[in-house]
Amino acid sequence: MKGENTQRALDKFGKYLVKESRKNLTRKKKNVTNSLYESLDYDVKAMPNSFEFDFLMNEYGEWVDKGRKAGKNPPFSPLRKWVEDRRIQFRSNKGKFQSYDQTAWAIVKSIGKKGIPASNFYSRPFNLGYAKLPNEIVEAYALDVEDFLEFTIDKLNEQYKDGSN
């Protein structure tokens, strides 16, 4: 059994997940460099007895989605790059612009102290799509079984007509 219908249902789920996650990133203004946006993808693999579904994204996407609890500082270098990409520079008490390093360090300390709220850019569409998925998979799998049975019966009928067993 090839499982084409089941694979199509998982493919539909993957497309929905990527589309909605990208919409959420844009709507929530979490899409400055397009790096995370462009990294969103999925992979469906059909094996003889099972299917595998993987959702792919840059590693830091997990932090964007789930947020970060207070108590531990995040890594400096990615935040330094983020600050420079957005051209963010805080001002000192005297009104002078701080360097990107100083600005990034202030943000690192703030995140370590306060945390970052979750955006759920990926979790929300995943949960909504997953709730619908079981019915679609059951229907698709039933079609795959039906196709397999038709194929098997046709093969048996051919063998019977040919007189071969």
Image (cartoon, rainbow, N blue to C red):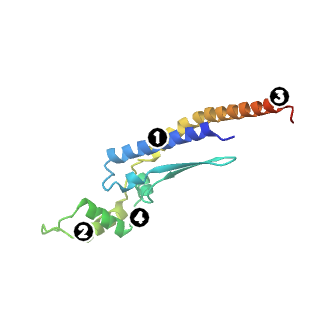
Q: Which residue is mark 4?
A: 71
* Structural distance between the alpha carbons of marks 4 and 2: 23 Å
* Structural distance between the alpha carbons of marks 3 and 2: 80 Å
* Structural distance between the alpha carbons of marks 1 and 2: 38 Å
Percent of width and height locating residue 165: 87, 36
Horizontal side of 17 relative to 147 (left or right) equals left
Q: Which residue is mark 3?
A: 161
Of circles 4 and 2, which is in front?
2
Identify which residue is drawn at 45% across, 43% down: 124
Q: Are marks 4 and 3 in contact (CB under 8 Å)?
A: no
Q: Which mark is residue 16?
A: 1
Q: Are marks 3 and 2 in contact (CB under 8 Å)?
A: no
Percent of width and height locating residue 17: 46, 43
Displayed quadrant of residue 77: bottom left
Q: Which residue is mark 2?
A: 100
Of circles 4 and 3, which is in front?
3
